[in-house]
Image (cartoon, rainbow, N blue to C red):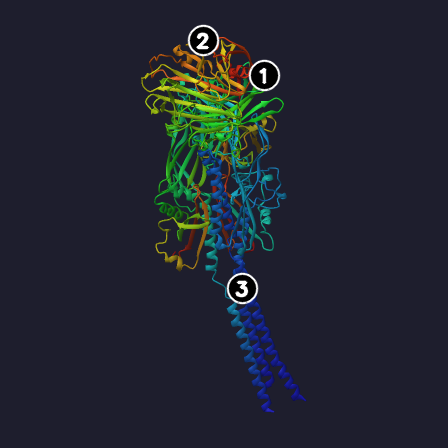
Amino acid sequence: MRRGRSRGGQIRIIEAILSAAIIVVSITIGIGLMKTPSPLSSRRTEDVSRFAYSLLFSLAEAETFDRVMYANGSLVPNWEEQMKVMIGSLLPSNMFFNMTVYNCTVNYGLVEEVVINSCPISNAANPEVFRESPAVAGAHITYTTRRLSILRVHLSLTWSDQP
Amino acid sequence: MKRHQRRREAKRKGQILLAVAVVISVLIMSVAMLTYATSVTHGRFQFQPYVEISSAIGADFGRALLRILARVTQEYNYTSDINIARATANRMFTNWVLVANSAFSARGAVIRPAWTTSEVQPPKTLYGYNYSGRSVYNLTKLYWYRPQSMSAIGASVSIEIPSMGFFGFRNSFLFLLNVTIDVPSINVDKKGGTVSFRLIVLREDEEPIFDLTATNILVRTFDPTASTSETGWKPATVVGLKYEGQGSYVVTFRPQLRVAQEASSYWNYYYKYLCVTVSDSRGIMVEAYSYSGIEFEADERSGIPFSAGGRHAQYVLEVLSNSTTLWFGKGLDQPTSPPVPPVPKSQLWVQTYVSAEGWKDTPAQVETWEQGQRFPSLEQIGIPSRFLERSRLVFVLDFPPSVDELRYRITWQSDCDYHPTGEIAAIEADNNIRVNNGYYIATVLSADDPAAWQNFTLRLQVGTFWADYWLFGYDSAEIDGALLIPRKVPYGRWAGFEGPVRSVVFRRSSAVIDRLYRSTTNEEALHEMALFFPRDESYFYWQMTVTWKQPFQLSNRFMRMFAVTATPGIDFGSLVESDGVNIINGSFAGRLMMHRDLRFNEGEDYGHWSAVYCNGFGASMFLPESTLVELGSFGEDQLWAWTSNTSERVMEFDMMYFRTPSVQFTVDPYDPVTGRGAGWLYEGGIADVPYPSDTLWRQYPDAPAMLLSTAVDIPRVYHRMFLDGCSPSLTSAKSI
Amino acid sequence: MELSLDALFSGLVLVVVVATLLSFLYPAAYGPLSLTREHQLEDIAKAALDKILLTPGYPTNWGSDIFFSPSSMTSFGLAREGSGFPFDLDLDKVMRLANSSEFPFPDTLAIDPLRVATLLGLRSEERYGFMITITPALNISAEQLSTFALDRGKEVPSNFDVQVLNYARRPAAAAKVTVLSVLSVVSAGKGGDLSWVNSTTSTAFTDWRGRCLVNNTQWLTQIKSGLRPGDLKKAHVSIMIFAEYHGITSATVFDFGEMVYGSALASYLFIQFEEEGQPSGAVHVLNMTEMIVPPYYVLTGYLINETNGQSGLVVNAGGKSYRVYRVSSPPTDEVAVAYIIAKTTGDYFSIAFMRPPGYICYRTGAPSAMKTAVLDRVVKIGALHFVFELKVWREAET
């Protein structure tokens, strides 16, 4: 009689342990599924991308590229500096930018892109900042100048994590 | 029994625990999966920049269209060639499509543009001017040169980004610049020396353009005091610009006048003729004029009885930029006329009013002459350019039988793609120049090689007949008992151009052949000759100036102005006008014979015309009064008619008759020889009733004068077209 | 006995398990789900912004049609109809948002923000509030430095220090500043008082601080030389500053001295005096308008008085608290500000109608929720650039 009671109790303990184990495993799996990506990086990238497009669009609409880059039909010397100052004045102080301007030409049906800024148009002293930052976004647009040159303007933006 | 029940209860409790644990774990997993799915699904709705990309592409497409239209208008304004401008537009458009597709290919964007067709303006009447409907198609359209003018471009683009699930976006653009001159508002302030007018400048959707300044507006006005070496259309100085709202400006300008003190005709008449070019801040240009054409009324004054064979009197008129109208090298009587604006030559358009049919198109061509309009030029042939001070608009004014008043108008096409005026082309020739005018074939001897025996200047052939015409010759010589008349003749290479109205062949040279020694010289005479061959006419006409380069002596005093030689081997008669009324009709002679010669009879008795003829062919010479005066300037002139020793009939107008023994003459470099004349081919005729009289016609037996001839009618009647006093006159001229 | 202990133990385990589940499950799910929910606010704000800026609304001419009833609006959008370029807004539609104490509209013209919220889909399962602010892209300020005496007791500002900041609030160096100075004068004439206008234009470039100086002394001296002493009854100077910073353009009007503001929509001018500051006695409006078209031109027009004769030009207190006038030359988008001169009890004053007003704020309420989505964009209204900012929040969180 006594032996039957012990076995029954042991089995129950085993069952209890088994139940607990099942629940622990499911909780562990659940925690893994409920992890969400860092809101900081996911939303920030989107914000930066939208901001980049908005800025490029505003500059294009205002014909800023024509006014800053060209005078009397040819490129203004040192226009990159002017562009740098201008863009820097329109961005928050903790934002880095890097702009590249390509002149697009068509030769025998093929599009060729040549970089026309002779020096970087950027406020980042260290180009590594774009690689290291968690939220980098880029945007590019095409811009047809008054001289009927077609430019492709690429703008990369990122936040500086420094206060 | 109890033990069995207890065992069963114990088993159920264990099962309950497990069951609950399983249920709980299922709940946890479900919630976790749902949360994960929500995050993933939300992640799919993360930012996709399709709005930004499509907006950027659409905006740059619109920007590109604006640039293209600006470039097209600027290029057309500069070159006057719409084909070059349009080719540029098409190339730029294609380039943009390629670049845009390439730039956004990484995003998977597919960009498809299309040219659209849309009506930009229905038919309307504005300030008294009627305008037909205007549409934009083939990407760009320019409607210029009217009081209301415009430049327009229209296209659309569709954008799809399949990778972002973005479809069906389409953006259409129509850009234009619309300029209207309020013609009734043109007002002159003679005291202030200014003219003002209202200008309305609108963009697409009839929105006003309100940021124009004086630098955006170029006003050109006509200066009646301009010299012949400059264009009469000169830029004025805009001294005032007032904006009245709704795109309306009042423009005040001061004209540029070469001799202001002599410009009263400007303030009274020419001030209302404006050429206004507007360029807006987008770079788009439009050129508008304050009038759309000039209408003339012309009277035919030759007195030709038009019942004569039902022929028309067809005059080749030439109009200069100041509207001076010429026929046969001389200006017609005309009132003060609106000037022809500096429109691209291909846009000019001539119409004549025919009572039964209304306004009919008249073929026209625009020629370029040298500065000063003295001599034709090959410059600008095939090169689109504007109608300026060196241009001539040439067309035929055709008076049908029984019509002696005609209305015609010179206007210009507003649609820059439509070119009513015919093109002219240079005549290519290695040596002799051939012109087929549809009635005769003209061959003009043209060579660099002095060995070419210069027997005539040009030959006109109709079927098997031909007549050789001579222009100018001087000096004479005797060789082996035979006479060489003339001894020296101008020669050299001719140049020419041809068009739908006429061909013009011309030469300016100092080269002279001495036929006696078969040598050449460039030291004696500079000769400038131009021959005109109207299409489908039986006549040609010429102008000539010979300037002696230095004083030198002619071995024999002889100078010939104009001569004709008949087809050899055929009997030809001769006709000479006498006293302006009578006709001297001479018949053929078989050997060397002088028939009309001052040495033998009344060779000095001649008139405006003469002819050689046979049954089936006649060739005549016409001279106007001014040339007859030139002929008679030495008092030794005659109309010489003779048969050569090879039995060819020759008739020639001489300034100095041939004489023996020789008499020397020294030419005067300050006394050039100038002349105009014409030749007319016709069907000839037959003669009857011999009339022997050595006084009238020095004859060999069997070569008497004749009383009657059917060959008289044509030259006797039609030479009147070439008389200075019988040219058509323009009785009215007004702008339309 | 043993059976009860087993059952107790099992029950305890069960209770612990359930408690653990509850303590884990709810917070574990709450975090990501609420994060997702919060981020949806930004998506809603973005969708609303795109709808407002990229669609013209329906009926498409709802801005300029003053007989349009807001209740018949089926779609809200500010885009200019027919413009192929995005973010090109209709001036009249923007003006309809500009109902404020400074620029009052008659009630029949105002658009209820709650109605707009419904049309934007912000009043569905969740209730969102929004606020739209529109400010010039370039912040232009002018400080009066000195005055000029046109007549005894009639001083007008003559010299100004102008500063231009871009929309990031940084100095706009090398910006081209065109200043259109307009002098409105009422002087004694032979047949009665004369009202006339004189204007001048000057151009300067800002320095590294975004500043430049404007000097109108020479112009005012020239005007004074043509005046008889004592004739001047009223003189008022407005300066319209048009600034262009690498293509970004803005214009601002500065009125020095007392100014009353009216509202303008399409070709109509609304004069409505608020309770405070209302001129005493009848206000007699002179039948002449000046309309300023930046950067160069001043247009003059007259009012079309569609009421009964001369009395239609009188704005009284009480029964006629506001008047509506139609302008002879309808001010299209090019007109930035219109002026009317009015007379009351022997004194003159100017009424200005700004198009659009310098600052527009249109909202359902004040944003005070825990989270507010803020989006902004540079847009074009007429020929000028503005910063359009949209804030959206959940009203349940306020």
Residue wearing tag 3: C30
Residue type (three-letter) at the residue carrying disc 3: Tyr
Which residue is denoted by mark 1 in the rendering?
A: B308
Q: Secondary structure at mark 1?
A: loop
Please tell me which of labels 1 and 2 falls first in the chain.
1
The quadrant of the image that shows the C terminus of chain C is bottom right
Could you say where residue B513 lies in the image, as x and y percent from the top left? Answer: 36, 23
Occupied quadrant, residue B162: bottom right
Amino acid carrying label 2: it is Glu
* Chain under numbered label 2: B
Chain ID of residue with mark 1: B
Res B333 seen here = no
Q: What residue would you read off at disc 2?
A: B602
Q: Looking at this rendering, what residue extends furthest in the front direction?
A: B701
User: How many angstroms separate mark 3 from mark 1 (CA)?
Assistant: 113 Å
Q: Quadrant of residue B259?
A: top left
Q: Nearer the viewer, residue B326 or B223?
A: B326
Please name the amino acid that badge 1 sits on.
Ala
Q: Secondary structure at mark 3?
A: helix
Q: CA distance from mark 2 to mark 3?
A: 132 Å
Q: Residues within 10 Å of mark 2 (few under 14, many from 20)?
A: some
Query: Is residue B61 visible in the rendered structure shown here?
Result: yes
Q: Residue B666 versus residue C16: which sits nearer the camera?
A: B666
Neighbours of disc 3 within 10 Å: few (<14), some (14-19), many (20+) = few
Cβ–Cβ under 8 Å for marks 3 and 1: no
Write down the quadrant of residue B372 in the picture.
top left
Chain designation of label 3: C
Image point (42%, 44%), residue name: A65
In the displayed structure image, the side of residue B314 where residue B4 appears, left or right: right
Above or below: residue C236 compared with residue B581: below
Task: Note whether B225 is above or below B74 in the view shown.
Answer: above
